[in-house]
Amino acid sequence: MNTQIKICGLSDIASIEAAARAGADYIGLVHFEKSPRHVSLEQAAELRKAASESLKTVLLLVNADPKTTGHAINTVRPDVIQFHGSETPEWVKLVRDQGRIEVWKALGVKDKPTLAKSARFAGATDRLLFDAPAKKLPGGTGTAFDWSLLAGHDHQIPWGLAGGLDPENVAEAIQITGTRLVDVSSGVESAPGIKDVDRIAAFCQAVREFDKRQSS
């Protein structure tokens, strides 16, 4: 089975088209004003419409209040909502159930105990994204965590890997963790918030080449 690929933090049609050409499965649109990858809900809606049918759209929110969350879902109509703040399992489950939408939750991984706490999201989220711990921004920092923490972990929830991935290290990350979904943002940029179409292609190629080696 191919490893799924999410290219996050896209803000223009050219990078979305590059993700589609390279064979990505998901694109991520960030609605968080402090992020260099922020897009308004109106921009996100236009980008979602422009995306190829081969791509699923993930809208990223950070500690959004109920009104903002509902407005975001209705305006953008994404395939997935990704929460990347301090959202509780109860809130995540409420959005998933009432919004009738697939929901992902990103979690920063510091050590084995924090990884173990991820089990509290069982039954609340459709997927966890394990990321580096938050710094000034909740994601997109280009920082990786200790991937060996995930090796052999008894996962109770479908999951993916984020944080510090790039074309040069993604194969190693998949090998160590066994992830079936990789999520990249700053690792395919030429500057914060500026996607590099060649690095998008290189990232996807590295993942697909890893998959081929594993299946041969």
Image: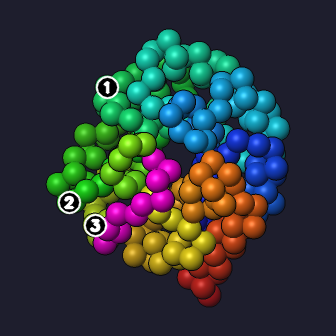
- First along the sequence among labels 1 and 3: 1
Q: Which residue is mark 1?
A: 90
- Cα separation, mark 2 vs mark 1, equals 23 Å
Q: Which residue is mark 2?
A: 112
Q: Of helix, strand and loop, which one carries label 1?
A: helix
Foreground residue among 157 and 208:
208
Query: x, y (%) of residue 148?
Result: 31, 72
**Mark 3 sits on what residue?**
149
Q: Nearer the viewer, mark 2 or mark 1?
A: 2
Whether residue 141 appears in magenta in the rendering, the answer is yes
| Residue at screen point 59% across, 21% down | 72
Left or right: 147, with 115 as reference point: right
Q: Which residues are drawn in magenta?
A: 139-148
- Secondary structure character of the magenta stretch overall: loop
Q: Amino acid at mark 3?
A: Leu
Identify the residue shown where x is 35% and y is 30%.
87
Marks 3 and 2: CB-CB under 8 Å?
A: yes
Which residue sits furthest front?
A: 191
